[in-house]
Amino acid sequence: MIWRFTSNGVYSSQSLYNIVNFRGILLVHVPAVWNLKMLPRVHFFLWLLSKNKLLTRDNLSLRRKVEDKSCLFCVEFESVHHLFFDCVVASQMWVCLAEVSGRYVGRSFEFIGTMWLSNKRFLVDNMFCVAGLWGLWKLRNSLCFQGCLWKDMKILIERVANMLQNWKLLCPKEKILEYNQKLEKLRNIVTRPHLLPVFKWL
């Protein structure tokens, strides 16, 4: 008899345990969430985001009746992917962060997740991306629960910049110069008059 779940064909309790406990293919960037230089509550937020468990209106409608399922920034249907990547506000935020980092970072959650796997290389950019995600979520909740009014992009970018100012203590000393330079670029974007321009990438 040959045990086909091991390379040598011999049965072992370890190979049986692996078969019984197989939970399918896991996305490799999900565990990388916990290695980011972040506050614990932000880690938990990112973990929920990676699992599509944030209580956006589509997910909330699975639990109870939701009359209005539209995004709080636009009239589209609110889902996790829409709120953080497809919404016009999210798209403009990623344009600003792309200008700061020098690379387009907001294509999708999977694209951001690949940067988490190389956290040593992309540590500063990862912190800026996470601040963008967290800032957008906090602003969305302020509009939803506290009756705040949406005015313009400067509110969001300023919120992200202030958050990054507070997170500076989390940045390692060898990366602090890069961090400060990029934070200064972001603050310069906030001071631009009128609407923030669209940043085009080739």
Image: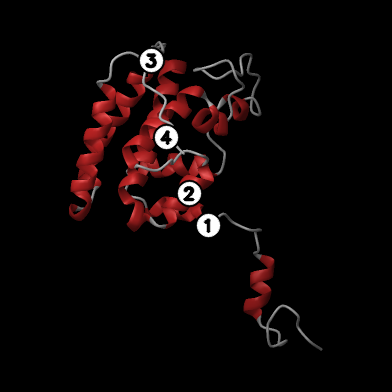
User: Cα distance, mark 1 to mark 4?
Assistant: 20 Å
User: Residue 20: x percent and y percent?
Assistant: 69, 67
* Amino acid found under the numbered disc labelled 3: Asp
Q: Mark 1 or 2 closer to N-term?
A: 1
Image marks 4 and 2: residues in contact by CB distance under 8 Å: no
Q: Would you say 65 lies left or right of 142 here?
A: right
> How many numbered marks are there?
4
Question: Could you say whether the residue bearing mark 4 is in a helix, strand or loop?
Answer: helix
| Mark 1 lies on residue | 28
* Amino acid found under the numbered disc labelled 4: Leu
Q: Nearer the viewer, mark 4 or mark 3?
A: 3
| Mark 3 lies on residue | 152
Find residue 101 and name its label.
none
Find residue 113 and name its label.
2
Q: Mark 1 or 4 closer to N-term?
A: 1
Q: Residues within 10 Å of mark 2 (few under 14, many from 20)?
A: many
Residue 55 visible at all = no
Image marks 1 and 2: residues in contact by CB distance under 8 Å: yes
Q: Nearer the viewer, mark 3 or mark 1?
A: 3
Q: Residue 79, relative to residue 49: is it above or below?
A: above
User: Residue 112: x percent and y percent?
Assistant: 46, 45
Q: Mark 4 or 2 closer to N-term?
A: 2
Residue 167 appears in which quarter of the rendering? top left
Residue 78 appears in which quarter of the rendering? top right
Q: Residue at x 40, y 30 (%)?
A: 199
| Mark 4 lies on residue | 133
Q: Nearer the viewer, residue 103 or 62?
A: 103
User: Cα distance, mark 4 to mark 2?
Assistant: 12 Å
Q: Residue at x 50, y 52 (%)?
A: 30
Q: Mark 4 or 3 closer to N-term?
A: 4
Q: Would you say 48 lies left or right of 131 here?
A: right
Q: Residue 126, relative to residue 59: is it above or below?
A: below
